Image: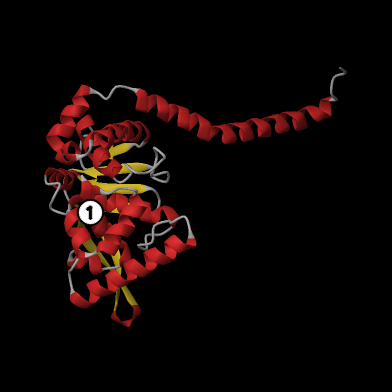
Amino acid sequence: MPEAPISALPLLLFLALVLAGLAALLLQPWWAARRRARLQALPFPAAWRRILRQRVPAVAALPADLQQRLKQLIQVFVAEKPFIGCAGQAITDEVRVTIAAQACLLLLGQPRPDGYPRLREILVYPDAFVVDALQPAPGGVVQARRQVLAGQSWTQGRVILAWTEVLAGAADPADGRNVVIHEFAHQIDQDSGSADGRPWRASRAQRRRWAAVMDEAYARHQREGPVLVSAQGAADPAEFFAELSERFFEQPQALAAEAPAVYRELALLYRLHPGAW
C-alpha cells in the first residue's frame, strides 16, 4: 500500500484521535459497570462490619438481602466518591462508611449501583458549620445573613455534612431526623436540575400523580402547620420532600398511617417498602 502524502498525516492523526476518543466515551459505561461489579464482588471488610454495628443500627433492621445489597452499594460509594475533611476533620473509614451506609439507604431499590451520578465530593466538618446566605428583604433589598447548618446539598454535585450531626442521625434510626438522608434526598431531587420537590419520574402519568399528591400534602402542611414534617419543611417543596424522605426511612409506619398516598409515592420513587421491615 503506498504511503499517504506527508500533508495528509496530521489529518489522519486527528481522525485517529477523534475515533479513539469516541471509542473511549462509548466504552466508559461498560468499564464503569465492570469496575463496580468487581467492587461489589469483594468481601465486605470486617472492620467496616464493626463500624456498621456500632454507628448505623438501622442496618441490622434490614432484611438479609437488603443488608447484602447495602454493603455492595457502600463498597462502590466509598471507592468512587471523594471525601474531604474541613476545619480539621479527619477522614477515616469510620467517617466514610457511616456516611455511605446512610446515603446508600436511598439507593437500595434502585437497579444501578451509582444512584448519585452528579455527586462529585462530600465535605465533612467536625460540627455545625456557618455559611453566608442571601435572603430577600422588604423593598427589593437582598441581605447577606449567616446561617449555622448541619448539612447542605449543592446542585454542583457537592454535599456538606457536620460529623456530629451524622452520628446523631445514625444513632437513633426511629426519630425521623437524619441529616444524611435529608441531604442525599436533595441530591436525588437535584438529578433533574434544581431542587424543587419533584424528583425525576419516568412517565408523564407518574409526574402528574406525584405533583397531585405532594402538592395537596404540602398545602395541608401550610394550612395546618407541622403535620407530616417539621416547621422547616414548610420552607419550600424541596425541604418538604427531604423531610418526608427522612420520615419514610425512619418512621414509615407512622407516615403510612398519616398520609398513605404520600407514603405510596415515596415507595414508588425509592422502590422500597420500609413499613414492612
Q: Report the front residue among 54 and 249.
A: 249
Q: At x 44% / y 27%, what residue is drawn?
A: 35
User: Residue 163 vs residue 42: left or right?
Assistant: left
Q: Please tell me whether residue 210 is drawn above or below residue 139 in the rendered image.
A: above
Q: Where is residue 174 in the image (x, y as percent from the top left)?
A: 13, 50
Instruction: Looking at this view, name the residue that lies furthest to the right.
Output: 2
How many numbered markers are drawn? 1
Q: Position of residue 61 (x, y in %)?
A: 17, 40
Q: Please tell me whether residue 274 is drawn above or below residue 22 in the rendered image.
A: below
- The residue identified by callout 1 is 246
Which amino acid is tagged 1? Glu
Q: At x 83% / y 29%, what residue is drawn?
A: 7
Q: Position of residue 144 (x, y in %)?
A: 28, 66
Residue 62: quarter of image: top left
Q: Report the front residue among 53 and 152.
A: 53
Residue 58 seen anywhere in this rendered image of the structure: yes
Residue 95: quarter of image: top left
Q: Report the front residue among 125 and 118.
A: 118
Residue 258: quarter of image: bottom left
Quarter the N terminus occupies: top right
